[in-house]
Amino acid sequence: MPDRLADPFFDTVTLSNFAVSGAFELLLDRYGRSLRVTEQVRAELAAGRIRGYSELEVVERALAEGTILPTEPMTMLESELFVELLRTLGSGEASCLALARHRGGVVVTDDRTARSCCAERGVPVTGSIGILKALCIDRSITSEDADAILSRMVDAGFYSPVRRISDLL
């Protein structure tokens, strides 16, 4: 997993994975106010909640209460990269990559295309599996808990290349 000191820019899918699995509090405990959510990701979260994904309310509540903070508006350079990235990525992933690239952060995404774009641009990236593994290494949760959380994510529709976090430790 990339350096924990760099601000993590979370995309909608990763936030959703933790929200639908009942594990969003783990993100708050691990990242606190350094967890970054772009305006584009906020819009995607709101759209998801309107479509019936009520589990996303926990993320919106954390934003409303100031437990996690939205990002500052994009600069001109960030906006230029964002627009370029929209050719291949959704707005949430593109905004995370543009801001992380220019602000020295880490993109947190499970989207394969977004991860490839991060690699092409030398931007550190992690995702749900990397976070669950790191939580086990830090002894914040047990490997059994991580496996159960991953199973709930998969049951909710997350495509995971691994079935058990415990196999990675």
Image (cartoon, rainbow, N blue to C red):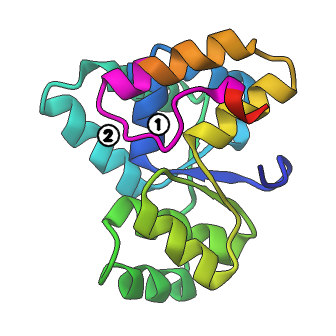
Q: Quadrant of residue 135?
A: top right
Q: Is residue 113 left or right of residue 125?
A: left
Q: In the image, residue 38 lies at what x, y percent?
A: 48, 55
**Is residue 165 magenta-colored?**
yes
Q: Amino acid at mark 2?
A: Leu
Q: Is residue 126 left or right of residue 89?
A: right
Query: Magenta residues?
Result: 152-166
Position above or below: 97 against 42: below
For mark 2, does the 10 Å Cα neighbourhood hold few (<14), some (14 to 19), or many (20 or more) residues?
many
Give the residue displayed 43% in from the left and 79% down from the top. Answer: 82
Dot 2: element? helix
Give the residue displayed 37% in from the left and 36% down from the top. Answer: 158
The front one of 153 and 70 is: 153
- Assign the magenta stretch its main secondary structure: loop
Q: In the image, residue 12 lies at what x, y percent?
A: 40, 45
Give the residue displayed 73% in from the left and 53% down from the top. Answer: 7
Residue lying furthest front: 167
| Camera sees residue 87 | yes
Q: Is residue 139 left or right of residue 157?
A: right
- Of discs 2 and 1, which sits in the foreground? 1
Identify residue for label 1. 15
Q: Amino acid at mark 1?
A: Leu
Position above or below: 156 against 33: above
Pointer 2 with pointer 1, Cβ within 8 A: yes
**Is residue 55 magenta-colored?**
no
Identify residue for label 2. 45
Position above or below: 93 against 35: below
